[in-house]
Amino acid sequence: MEVYLGRTAAGNGRHRSRIFRGTRTEAERELARMVTTQADAPAVLDPAAPGISGPLRWGVGTTVNDAIAGWKLNGWDDLSPTTTRRYEVIWRLHVRESIGRRRLVDLTPWDFECYFRELKAAGQSQSSVRYARAMLHRACRLARKWSKGALPNPVADTEMPEWRYGEQAVPVRAPSVVEVRAIMAAADAGEDRRLWLFIRVTAASGARRGEICAIRWSDIDWAQGSVRIDESIISAPGGGMLKQPKTHASVRPLALDAGTIDALRSLRVDNEAMAIEYGTMLDPDGFVFSVEPDGRAAPHPDVFTVKFRRLCDRAGVASDVHLHSLRHFQSTQLDSVLTSKQKQAGMGWSTAHMDTIYTDAISSEDRRAADHIGVLLDNPIGVAEPAYCPQPAPEAPSA
């Protein structure tokens, strides 16, 4: 018996055949069942082929790969390019040839939890497994919606494996003032003034690397000594890509110290002179850290990340300090100056709880508690602490 399955994205016809032993009537009944099952199955999709179009049908034959392919056709473009690129890598390396081939109706939360533990056992980090779960959850949830509830979402009730402290990735460390100065000195010695200033602005503002790359000359308020953060440059195929902020909290003005403002003003004078030398004019709305004479081409964030790592090696700074560590540096150094709520506005956090992640310093409350215990322990012998004197009970009212 043979059933026509339609055509692939390349236009080739596909069929499914099987050998059936029985009477003619039984064979016709089985053929009818196969045709019915195929009618309920989705079109065969190749997630790697972006040109798939036409209505999709969701049924018992829908696989995990089909669900991801459907999401690619309807909603994938709404994601950040950074997120889609990471999803694409996870799908190709860990999903496509394994659990991606299985039908949704055959999978249970137990199957997915076993799959997540297999990823962990294979050496995948907690972050990678979390991304895989998020991608699969979203794809299966959409398949359930598009099938009008006929398909399950077995990822919804799954739990992540546990990573012990020693199994987790090394957290980002806030560098010391001495380390930051050593990195800046290495940049200055290399006579790369633009790189030196990029590091200074990052450390002085605590902004993300993509936000620093997106600063335009028109964003700087010279009179107020501040810069407005309202865009970001992210890594994308073919180069950097301008991205609008994800949340309202990311749009914020940041005050800069006088030394940083003076350095920015000096860079502008140099850039204007370079533009004239190349026979053009510096665009007033150009990017501050662009290497183009007119400043219209945005710099790529990855370039600064690579250069920063080289500077750390040259300065003898430990390898656990990254460009993003400067954001932790700013948060830690401001811990004794600002409250968590005040830092939330400047750092562009969605919640003040992020302070516990970005700050390595001992909190003022912990310091006061430690000092109080120290006084009790170091109290000179013979000088007793005030004894506890309970208050007398009030007399009962007379009758």
Image (cartoon, rainbow, N blue to C red):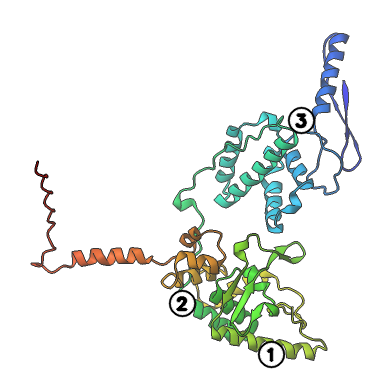
Are discs 3 and 1 less than 8 Å apart at CB? no
Q: What amino acid is at disc 3?
A: Gly
The part of the image, by quadrant, that contains residue 300 is: bottom right
Instruction: Say which mark, if any, is on residue 183.
Output: none
CA gap, disc 3 and disc 2: 60 Å
The amino acid pointed to by label 2 is: Val
The amino acid type of the residue labelled 1 equals Val
Question: Reading the chain from its start, which is encountered first: label 2 or label 1?
Answer: 2
- Return the residue at label 1: 269
Circle 3 sits on which residue? 61
Q: Residues within 10 Å of mark 1 (few under 14, many from 20)?
A: few
Tell which of 35 and 334 is nearer to you. Answer: 334
Residue at 44%, 67% in the rendered image: 339
Horizontal side of 254 relative to 33 (left or right) equals left
Q: Residues within 10 Å of mark 2 (few under 14, many from 20)?
A: few
Q: Secondary structure at mark 2?
A: helix
Q: In percent of the image, x 8 and y 67: which residue is there?
A: 382
Q: Quadrant of the N terminus?
A: top right
Q: Nearer the viewer, mark 3 or mark 1?
A: 1
Q: Secondary structure at mark 3?
A: loop
For label 3, count other residues whose C-alpha is less than 10 Å away and answer few (under 14), some (14-19) or many (20+).
many
Q: Are marks 3 and 2 in contact (CB under 8 Å)?
A: no
Residue tagged 2:
177
Name the element at disc 1: helix
